[in-house]
Image (cartoon, coloured by chain):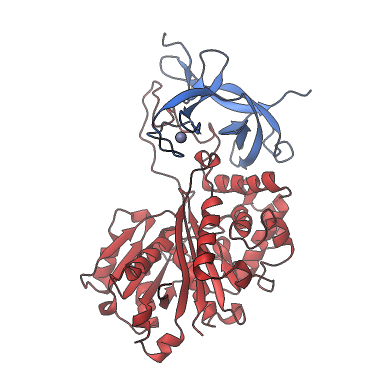
């Protein structure tokens, strides 16, 4: 790996192939987490395995945070795994963002550091028109 | 069933801007007034529990003693986010239940006027090259990159989630909930804001996080509240006029989140509230149908809706029709937040959980003046702090 390889903005975004989110699944009860855990919040077991998260999901909740650059924050239900995410490539207003709308995983550039290394963040975007 | 515990002294300061009063002035004011309310002094108090979230490491309980009376009693400084005040009361109650005290005092105080959006401590500066940090291994702030963590946004999502689960919620609906609370506030001289808003004024105000506009958010204000609680045995030895105004604590419950998949990424304020309500109704032998009024934690208009359901004021999934029926208005079947709620009263975090109980106490004593709910005999006070902690207290008038 060279310093020019892109780096994921958060640990659970896997850029090794087609970008995907990876949860830490409890080996005992299958509860899934994105942040590092010492033990499972559901059953207290202490071992976890990587588990890919579906790339598409439905918006189960959202808000639009006001400001000079409003953004859409949502919880995306990816086959039962709840993913906190920003929704991009959509007008940030309640006419365009809707509960239960289907969205898919995407990535965006989160900037470069002093070495020119690019950070890649994840977000969700609306599915293309059928 | 164990003997009941009684609230005999209760007070809150006016909530709002108090530029000339510091944390200890506010706490002293509420504490001394609560003592006076039941003809007691610090010499009578066996245990003190104090919450002040902004100075959680500051031993504010001991600082308060230096202003109102250092008697050497045990002090518990508590912090439990927005449920801090209710937690302080819970501690005093548990000390009495445990037989360690006969008279307990709980105080919540906060100075928040002029503070903007509250957030955690600022992040340490980062270097000029990417370096993963924290439990997410994040390269920078998550706000705006991984959704939002700001409170108006988090609670907006909680309200919208209810819509996803059960159908019809709208900007208009949430704004009308806020309209109700602001209308109620005009009768409460202790509220920070006593302004009635039209629905249009609420909807056209500054949008903070859709669907919450500014008047739909609780304000950062200063305030304190204090309460004196006693054992049943001690109550029976008190003067008749103190006993007459005593209010029975029919249930006092504090819960935290049980594991839910969703609450790992969006706080689940529902499950622990429902659990607390269930436990409280059971302990009190009282059902939601017996309540005359409710003060619930409307930190945002979007939160009030879900708590109608969580507190079982309606059938599951029926919070919207409960509101549409007019029930939670002060002249409705089950008045909710006749104090004006946090949206009007303001939300001095650690004081809030005691102040909402104070409101119920005031009605059960028939002392709420213009905003009195006539003949109120039973009331419920609810508070929630993210993390989460939920306090539910059910109170009954003495006779
Ligand atoms: Zn597990």
**x then y, percent, for residue B205:** 65, 53
Residue B307 sits in quarter: bottom right
Vertical relation: A47 (above or below) B30: above
Left or right of B97 in this view: B223: right
Q: Residue furthest bottom?
A: B240
> Chain B is which colour?
red
Residue A83 sits in quarter: top right
Q: Which residue is more in the foreground, B56 or B43?
A: B43
Vertical relation: B355 (above or below) A24: below
**x then y, percent, for residue B368:** 55, 79
Q: Residue furthest left?
A: B72
- The residue shown at (45%, 45%) is B119
Vertical relation: A113 (above or below) B162: above
- The residue shown at (37%, 75%) is B228
> Chain A is which colour?
blue
Vertical relation: B245 (above or below) B320: below
**x then y, percent, for residue A76:** 61, 34
């Amino acid at each position: 790996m060279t310093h020019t390889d892109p780096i994921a903005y958060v640990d659970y975004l896997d850029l090794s192939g087609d970008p995907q989110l990876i949860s830490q699944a409890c080996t005992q009860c299958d509860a899934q987490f994105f942040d590092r855990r010492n033990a499972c919040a559901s059953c207290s077991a202490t071992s976890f395995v990587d588990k890919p998260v579906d790339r598409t999901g439905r918006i189960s909740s959202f808000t639009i945070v006001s400001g000079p650059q409003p953004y859409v924050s949502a919880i995306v239900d990816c086959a039962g795994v709840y993913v906190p995410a920003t929704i991009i490539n959509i007008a940030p207003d309640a006419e365009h963002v809707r509960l239960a709308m289907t969205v898919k995983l995407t990535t965006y550039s989160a900037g470069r550091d002093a070495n020119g290394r690019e950070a890649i963040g994840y977000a969700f975007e609306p599915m293309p028109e059928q | 069933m164990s003997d009941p515990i009684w609230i005999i002294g209760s007070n809150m300061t006016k909530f709002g801007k108090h530029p000339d009063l510091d944390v200890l002035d506010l706490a002293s004011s509420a504490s001394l007034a609560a003592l006076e309310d039941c003809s007691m002094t610090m010499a009578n108090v066996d245990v003190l529990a104090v919450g002040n979230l902004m100075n959680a490491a500051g031993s504010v309980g001991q600082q308060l003693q230096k202003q109102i009376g250092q008697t050497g009693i045990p002090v518990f400084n508590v912090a439990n986010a927005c449920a801090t005040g209710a937690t302080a009361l819970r501690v005093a109650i548990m000390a009495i239940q445990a037989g360690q005290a006969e008279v307990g005092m709980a105080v919540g105080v906060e100075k928040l006027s002029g503070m903007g959006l509250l957030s955690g401590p600022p992040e340490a500066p980062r270097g000029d090259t990417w370096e993963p940090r924290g439990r997410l291994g994040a390269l920078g702030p998550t706000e705006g990159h991984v959704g939002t963590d700001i409170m108006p946004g988090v609670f907006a999502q909680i309200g919208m989630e209810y819509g996803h689960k059960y159908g019809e919620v709208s900007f208009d609906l949430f704004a009308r909930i806020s309209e109700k609370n602001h209308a109620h506030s005009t009768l409460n001289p202790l509220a920070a804001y006593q302004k009635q808003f039209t629905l249009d004024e609420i909807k056209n105000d500054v949008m903070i996080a859709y669907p919450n506009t500014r008047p739909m958010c609780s304000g950062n204000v200063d305030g304190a509240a204090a309460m004196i609680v006693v054992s049943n045995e001690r109550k029976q030895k008190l003067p008749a006029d103190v006993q007459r105004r005593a209010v029975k604590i029919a249930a006092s419950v504090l819960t935290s989140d049980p594991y839910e998949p969703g609450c790992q990424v969006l706080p689940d304020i529902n499950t622990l509230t429902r659990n607390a309500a269930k436990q409280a109704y059971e302990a009190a032998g009282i059902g939601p149908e017996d309540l005359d009024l409710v003060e619930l934690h409307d930190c945002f208009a979007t939160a009030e809706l879900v708590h109608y359901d969580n507190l079982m004021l309606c059938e599951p999934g029926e919070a919207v029709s409960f509101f549409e029926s007019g029930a939670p208005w002060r002249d409705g079947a089950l008045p909710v937040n006749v104090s004006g709620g946090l949206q009007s009263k303001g939300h001095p975090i650690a004081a809030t959980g005691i102040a909402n109980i104070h409101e119920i106490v005031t009605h059960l004593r028939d002392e709420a003046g213009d905003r009195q709910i006539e003949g109120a005999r039973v009331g419920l006070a609810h508070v929630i702090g993210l993390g989460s902690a939920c306090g539910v207290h059910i109170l009954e008038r003495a006779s």
